[in-house]
Image (cartoon, rainbow, N blue to C red):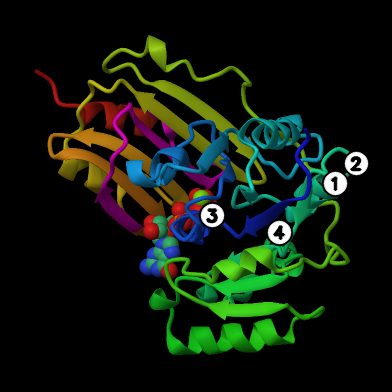
Amino acid sequence: MTVANVPTTLFTGFFGVGKTTAIRHLLSHKPPDERWAVLVNEFGEVPVDGAALEPDEAETDGVVIREIAGGCMCCTMNLPMKAAITEVLRRARPERLIIEPTGIGHPAGILDELRGDDLRDAVDVGAVICLVDPRVVQDPRLREVALLRDQVHLADVLVANKADLAADDDLEAFDAWARNLFPPKAVIETTSRGVLDPALLDLAGDAARVPLFPHLHDHEHDHGSPESLDTGTLSPGKPIRRRSTGEGFDACGWIFDARDVFRRDDLVDLLGPPGPVGNLQRLKGVFRTPDGWLLMDRVRNEMTVMPIAYRRDSRVEVIAETGNIDWTGLEGALLELIETG
Ligand SMILES: Nc1nc2c(ncn2[C@@H]2O[C@H](COP(=O)(O)OP(=O)(O)OP(=O)(O)O)[C@@H](O)[C@H]2O)c(=O)[nH]1
Ligand SMILES: [Mg+2]
């Protein structure tokens, strides 16, 4: 039996806007007897979201999370994306599919793929949900970035997330801007921590929305090496390192042996804002420290550090505008934070 018409929702939005947070919130409202699949594409080669998304043991039931690392799902030529969707549909046979592209994924390419010959019958694409940070609206430099404009333009549902961090005038500006967009949005929401009405997943999308910049995703970039990350060969003090580039951004990720233990406070000083690392867009890491395993999550100059259940290895992924970070220097600094003896 082939899968057919699996309700599918695409979450778009720039690096760190809260896509995964919103998906986690929706997963926590999943009816217990349903099976959902989540496909997450990360820009860098070292996936961290999977570790962060791993639900508590009790919640694992009925949720399948699949990560596609190292790339940009937006490329129409990106066969791994199509293969991953096909595989997750066939193997997990989910009753719902949620897709999170990278922060710089162009939704047009993904939507073309989902509505194309190979997947059209398998999935039923619902409303496209785009998250934005409302603080961006008053910054024309950011608001006018073509990719962000297309993420917004192709969305049926526009959500201002991180309302808790925005000033009242940011939220008012967002509202005025969102209501003036053409064609109009089906739903405009303001929220914090990705709290969204699960009914949005059943909202129909408007397939007639077309991109303003259709050629943006005809870009060239380096998807890095397709080789798998073989963590079986890790040894203490000798991390695996992976780089990828594209769209004016560089990503570098490391995976460390689980026996490497990092000095917690020095780690926060190194990787947190303002920090010596330089101007970065996004940082996600899980680290073993003497106080336990920690998740570090930084979006530009905001960082949170919290305990995490993941225990397999320490790993970190950093994304910055091209040329902003000395990766070898950062690797050296990380290695110096490993406790010895
Ligand atoms: N203060 C605040 N923090 C938030 C909110 N939503 C998400 N965050 C935090 O912002 C950070 C990024 O959230 P994610 O959900 O990982 O964002 P994302 O869009 O999936 O990020 P990428 O996949 O890396 O592009 C995390 O530390 C979240 O806890 C919010 O409404 N308010
Ligand atoms: Mg995410």
Q: Is residue 279 above or below residue 314?
A: below
Label 1 Cα neighbours within 10 Å, binned few <14 / some 14-19 / many ≥20: some
Alpha-carbon span between mark 2 and mark 3: 30 Å
Q: Is mark 2 within 8 Å of ligand 2?
A: no
Q: Name the residue beneath numbered marker 3.
A: 15
Q: Residue at x 67, y 82 (%)?
A: 178
The segment highlighted magenta reads 303-328
Label 2 Cα neighbours within 10 Å, binned few <14 / some 14-19 / many ≥20: few
Q: Is mark 1 within 8 Å of ligand 2?
A: no
Rendering coords of residue 227 (x, y %): 59, 17
265 or 110, nearer to the observer:
110
Q: Name the residue beneath numbered marker 4.
A: 147
Residue depth check, mark 4 versus mark 2: number of the one nearer the observer: 2
Q: Name the residue beneath numbered marker 2.
A: 117
Q: Is residue 9 magenta?
A: no
Alpha-carbon span between mark 4 and mark 3: 12 Å
